């Protein structure tokens, strides 16, 4: 644990009590001058820390930012989120994840308060203002490239479960969206770097419209989108939400790597807003209108065309009609 994180941990444990600089220096094995420098650094990061001569330091307020020390505090994972790279503003967390993938371990998370070039599937732009949750995970699973698409479903189930625990009727829309009342609140983007039969790394990006005002969105996007603030009637604790998603994702990801994709599919079917619906699937230059009748054991959408033909779709954009 870094000195700054250790100081925060001690101040949080003491709640509203003052903690002397001498005590902190003894606990960390650093000088009181270094303690002061770390405190000043935390203040610059948005923490409100009171200091009184002969009393020490007292934590008064934690900033509403997804800072690594806050996300890691009480995070119950083995490897997801143990390494976090944080940015106030970034072009894209997934683009940065690709840059960092070679030199960072499995489970590394990149998180930002704002993306200025956020991306969705098929290269579509993703408006990512402050107040949302914009994160990407670097994964290094020992699986073949043709299994990577399943991780989108794994992430979808994890996010849906955490949102449902907030009392929201979150549903998964094939292949990569989370809906509330038929409006999109979360998108998932899964990308990989692979050779013929070996995956070098996978980047799973998750974007959630959390505490954002819908009138901040472009008009055409606003009609199809909701936010957690809108659905709940107030702000959500973003730090707790990120922790919950990382914990739930690790649980399902570990099960997937252990060969248990069946249970994930069971959850996905239960949360699905697509199965049983009339849909339009656009894949490349091909567009079909059909009924979504199920999902197979490999995560492919099973559809029935108007002539009764049954097909399986692995990729494509799905529209509910």
Image: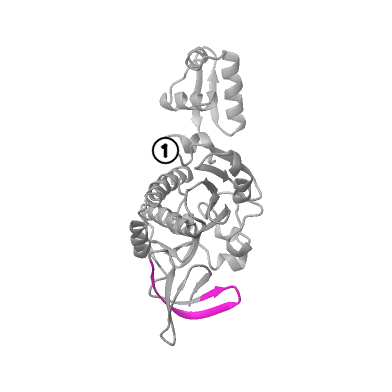
> Which percent across, then down, holds residue 270?
34, 63
Please report the bounds of the magenta region as a residue range. 281-296
Side of 120 where 19 appears, left or right? left
**Residue, x 60% and y 39% (percent of image)?**
103
> Which percent across, then down, holds residue 296?
39, 68
Side of 7 where 293 appears, left or right? left
Q: Nearer the viewer, residue 32 or 266?
A: 266
Mark 1 closeness class: few <14, some 14–19, many ≥20 residues within 10 Å: few
In what element is the residue under mark 1?
Answer: loop
- Give above or below for 17 relative to 272: above
The answer to whether one can see residue 124 in this image is no
> Which percent across, then down, holds residue 208?
51, 54
Which residue, as the protein is rendered here, is positioned at the far bottom? 307
The answer to whether one can see residue 108 in this image is yes
User: Mark 1 — residue?
Assistant: 78
**Residue, x 37% and y 53% (percent of image)?**
259
**Residue, x 34% and y 59% (percent of image)?**
262
- Give above or below for 178 relative to 22: below
């Amino acid at each position: 644990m870094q000195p700054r994180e250790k100081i925060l941990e001690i101040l949080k444990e003491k709640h509203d009590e003052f903690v002397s600089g001498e005590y902190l220096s003894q606990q960390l094995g650093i000088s009181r001058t270094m303690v002061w420098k770390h405190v000043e650094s935390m203040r610059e990061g948005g923490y409100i820390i009171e200091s009184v001569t002969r009393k020490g330091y007292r934590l008064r307020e934690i900033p509403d930012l997804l800072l690594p020390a806050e996300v890691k505090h009480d995070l119950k994972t083995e490897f997801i989120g143990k390494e976090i790279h944080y940015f106030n503003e970034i072009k894209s967390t997934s683009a940065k994840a690709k840059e960092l993938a070679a030199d960072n371990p499995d489970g590394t998370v990149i998180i930002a308060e704002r993306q200025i070039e956020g991306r969705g599937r098929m290269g579509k732009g993703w408006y990512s203002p402050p107040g949302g949750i914009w994160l990407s995970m670097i994964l290094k699973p020992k699986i073949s490239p043709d299994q990577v698409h399943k991780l989108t479903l794994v992430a979808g189930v994890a996010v849906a479960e955490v949102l449902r625990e907030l009392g929201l009727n979150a549903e998964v829309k094939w292949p990569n969206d989370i809906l509330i009342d038929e409006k999109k609140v979360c998108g998932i983007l899964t990308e990989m770097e692979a050779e013929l039969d070996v995956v070098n790394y996978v980047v799973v990006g998750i974007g959630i419209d959390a505490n954002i005002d819908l009138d901040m969105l472009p008009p055409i996007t606003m009609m199809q989108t909701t936010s957690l603030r809108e659905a709940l009637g107030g702000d959500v604790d973003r730090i707790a939400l990120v922790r919950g998603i990382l914990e739930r994702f690790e649980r399902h990801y570990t099960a997937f790597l252990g060969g248990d994709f069946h249970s994930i599919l069971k959850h996905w079917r239960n949360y699905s807003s697509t199965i049983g619906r009339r849909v339009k699937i656009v894949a490349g230059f091909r567009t079909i209108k059909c009924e979504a009748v199920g999902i197979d054991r490999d995560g492919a959408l099973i559809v029935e065309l108007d002539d009764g033909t049954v097909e399986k779709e692995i990729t494509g954009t799905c529209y509910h009609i």
